[in-house]
């Protein structure tokens, strides 16, 4: 198991706790803000009193003392929590607590009240700056709520809340409505807008048998769906859950300081004590304690990580944890599956070898007519190809197990569709088999052979350009692992530009290949979609599963999921991860650098007469620098036609 999986928070967090925690945090922050406002009001009254009533300055001191007692409540609570749950926030809380205590001892009530007030206002600033990400999460949550038209046992449709849907329910989605949850189309045809989930600007045409995602918009038509996933298991729920997870992201420098938080606090206290012994300047000592608060470092990683996960979701990429963003930048090789990953995952008719050219149209019509009575992949491919033409109406259909189908027309013509063994069984002479590495099917009428149909699982239109782009990003070592036979594997490898091919491999062989790749010093990215890819996906440095046709096992084993299964998004993910990691590193350097500068100025007494107040004000600049640098990541956007950096052109169609 790689280090990203060791450090990544579990994705299957309790939903109730995830939903309740932000509400409690907001309520607690509201109480803190109210206390800070009360303290600030008392300090303002005291300041005005001291101006207009200089002879009674004791009143101002009393007001400042009351203000310090008010803000001492949230400070004490924070210090107590920091002792129970150590962390960077805890370091800040403890240092502020020590500074308040020192200010009380020295009799500086104004500093004791104003310092925590400024810090609380600074925390409010951080929260407001991150509010856009929270708004994005709430916006996605709204998509998961609404009214669904569910079919009852009596066959009528009733309006129910989306949250009441269960797997297996049949729902109706009308034009202009959001799809209530992930499902499969049972009936109907419509154009779907998946932009919010997959980043696709163009609408997607869906019909019977197609999978659709909850949250997408039905732009036209009427669809009847069977719900396949609900709640957190659905694509929209996964996005929301992953964005919540990203808020707790921590870079290595943050984790390092957290492990030594106690040592860090002790070191700062010793430095502050040395400043006091050397200069006798109490304000300078207090300023050092305040300047050392690592507020900017606290958000150095969560801010860009949350932005990156949100941007990835906008591009149709689900990242299970911010730790995998770090891993993506170190990948050196690619191990990829063939069927359903490099290819479309379904058979298509690629060629028609007709004995007599004039029989071509009739052969297609008869084949589609028989195909309508079977769910075999070959039959479905024939039916799809005949959608633009006419499928013959046939009767008395008989299925010959493993061989093919026979039937008759209205004129009692006997039609046979299937493999060569079927024609041998029926005593029908056939021409030589075409040289083809995929499935073959022939058709005959009244004992006269008409046509060979050649089928293949075609490569995805974007596969070659996407792999070229991945190679340009440093993953030039690319390996195709497939359980298919060598000839078909080599054909796909040649088409997409992969030189190293391992065919007819079992799931355990894929696992061993990934382990060997890792032991050789490589950091492999593994991409797959099937149950046989699950072991390899877990063994790789990072595993990516195809979302549209990927099995639940593969998706559960993967670290990253491509919702639309567009291979060009792998390059997008690598570029995004590298930019995110660079942003985190810059944030860490800025946060640490500003802390060191501020501590130096505080120790030298260059922050004015009341250095602690100056340090409290100036330390927020580091927070603003980190937030501003993180916000740059939100501008990251790659349209699909530009993601690979190569013009894909129009997909090539086989003209039959």
Image: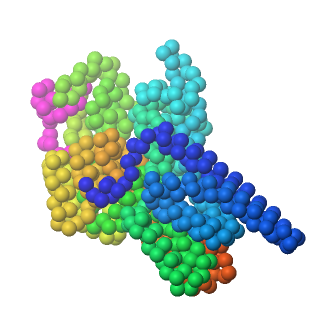
Q: Nearer the viewer, residue 412 or 643?
A: 643
The number of numbered badges drawn on the structure is: 0
State the image coordinates of residue 470 (x, y, percent, origin top left). Answer: 34, 65
The magenta span reads 415-438
Q: Please give the name of the residue rendered at 63% of the width and 67% of the height, measured from the top-left corner.
A: 104
Can you give x and y, in whole percent of width and height, for residue 296 in the image?
A: 53, 68
410 shown above or below 428: above
Q: Is residue 264 magenta?
A: no
Q: Quick check: 144 left or right of 63?
A: left
Query: Is residue 600 in sight in this rendering?
Result: no
Residue located 34% across and 70% down the image: 472
Give the residue displayed 51% in from the left and 18% down from the top: 152
Report x, y in % for residue 617: 64, 72
> In the rendered structure, does residue 418 fall within the stretch colored magenta?
yes
- Residue 461 % position (x, y): 37, 55
Q: Residue at x 11, y 26 (%)?
A: 425
Q: Is residue 104 left or right of residue 513?
A: right
Q: Is residue 398 visible?
A: yes
Image quadrant in which you'd find residue 39? bottom right
Between 309 and 54, the one lying in front of the other is 54
Quarter-of-image position of residue 142: top right
Quick one: 653 or 565, which is closer to the camera? Answer: 565
């Amino acid at each position: 198991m790689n280090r990203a999986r060791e450090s990544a928070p579990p994705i299957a967090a309790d939903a109730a706790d995830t939903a309740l925690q932000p509400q409690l945090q907001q309520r607690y922050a509201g109480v803190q803000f109210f206390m800070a406002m009360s303290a600030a009001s008392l300090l303002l009254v005291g300041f005005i009193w001291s101006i207009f009533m200089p002879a009674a300055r004791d009143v101002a001191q009393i007001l400042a003392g009351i203000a310090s007692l008010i803000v001492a409540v949230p400070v004490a609570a924070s210090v107590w929590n920091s002792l129970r749950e150590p962390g960077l926030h805890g370091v800040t809380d403890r240092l502020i607590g020590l500074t308040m205590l020192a200010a009380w001892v020295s009799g500086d009530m104004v500093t004791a009240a104003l310092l925590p007030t400024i810090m609380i206002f600074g925390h409010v600033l951080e929260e407001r700056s991150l509010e856009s990400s929270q708004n994005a999460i709430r916006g996605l949550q709204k998509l998961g709520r609404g009214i669904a038209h569910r079919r009852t046992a009596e066959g009528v449709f009733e309006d129910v809340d989306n949250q009441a849907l269960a797997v297996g329910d049949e729902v109706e989605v009308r034009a202009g409505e959001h799809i209530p949850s992930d499902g499969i189309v049972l009936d109907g045809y419509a154009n779907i807008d998946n932009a919010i989930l997959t980043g696709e600007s163009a609408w997607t045409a869906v019909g019977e048998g197609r999978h659709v995602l909850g949250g997408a918009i039905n732009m036209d038509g009427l669809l009847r769906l069977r719900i396949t996933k609900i709640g957190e298991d659905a694509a929209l729920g996964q996005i929301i859950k992953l964005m919540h997870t990203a808020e707790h992201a921590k870079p290595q420098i943050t984790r390092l300081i957290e492990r030594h938080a106690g040592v860090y606090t002790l070191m700062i206290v010793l430095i502050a004590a040395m400043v006091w012994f050397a200069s006798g300047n109490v304000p300078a000592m207090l300023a050092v304690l305040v300047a050392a608060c690592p507020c900017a470092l606290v958000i150095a990683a969560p801010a860009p990580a949350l932005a990156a996960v949100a941007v990835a979701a906008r591009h149709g990429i689900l990242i299970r944890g911010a730790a995998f963003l770090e891993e993506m930048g170190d990948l050196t090789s690619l191990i990829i599956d063939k069927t359903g990953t490099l290819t479309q995952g379904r058979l298509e008719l690629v060629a028609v070898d007709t004995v007599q050219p004039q029989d071509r149209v009739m052969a297609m019509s008869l084949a589609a007519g028989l195909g309508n009575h079977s769910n075999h992949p070959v039959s479905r491919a024939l039916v799809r190809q005949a959608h633009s033409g006419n499928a013959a109406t046939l009767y008395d259909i008989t299925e010959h197990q493993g061989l093919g189908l026979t039937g008759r027309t209205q004129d009692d013509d006997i039609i046979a569709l299937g493999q060569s063994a079927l024609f041998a069984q029926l005593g029908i002479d056939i021409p030589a088999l075409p040289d083809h590495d995929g499935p073959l099917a022939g058709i005959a009428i009244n004992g006269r052979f008409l046509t060979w149909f050649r089928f293949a699982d075609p490569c995805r239109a974007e596969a070659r350009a996407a792999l070229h782009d991945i190679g340009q990003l440093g993953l030039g070592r690319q390996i195709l692992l497939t359980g298919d036979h060598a000839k078909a594997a080599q054909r796909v490898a040649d088409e997409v530009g992969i030189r190293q091919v391992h065919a007819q491999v079992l799931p355990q062989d894929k696992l061993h290949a990934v382990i060997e790749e890792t032991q050789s010093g490589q950091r492999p990215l593994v991409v797959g979609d099937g149950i046989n890819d699950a072991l390899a996906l877990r063994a790789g440095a990072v595993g990516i599963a195809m979302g549209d046709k990927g099995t639940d096992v593969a998706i559960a084993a993967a670290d990253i999921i491509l919702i639309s299964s567009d291979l060009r998004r792998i390059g997008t993910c690598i570029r995004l991860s590298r930019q995110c990691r660079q942003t985190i590193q810059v944030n860490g350097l800025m946060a640490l650098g500003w802390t060191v500068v501020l501590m130096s100025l505080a120790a030298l007494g260059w922050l004015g007469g009341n250095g602690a107040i100056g340090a409290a004000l100036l330390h927020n600049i580091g927070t603003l620098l980190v937030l501003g640098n993180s916000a740059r990541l939100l501008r990251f956007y790659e349209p699909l036609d530009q993601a690979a950096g190569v013009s894909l052109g129009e997909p090539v169609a086989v003209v039959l």
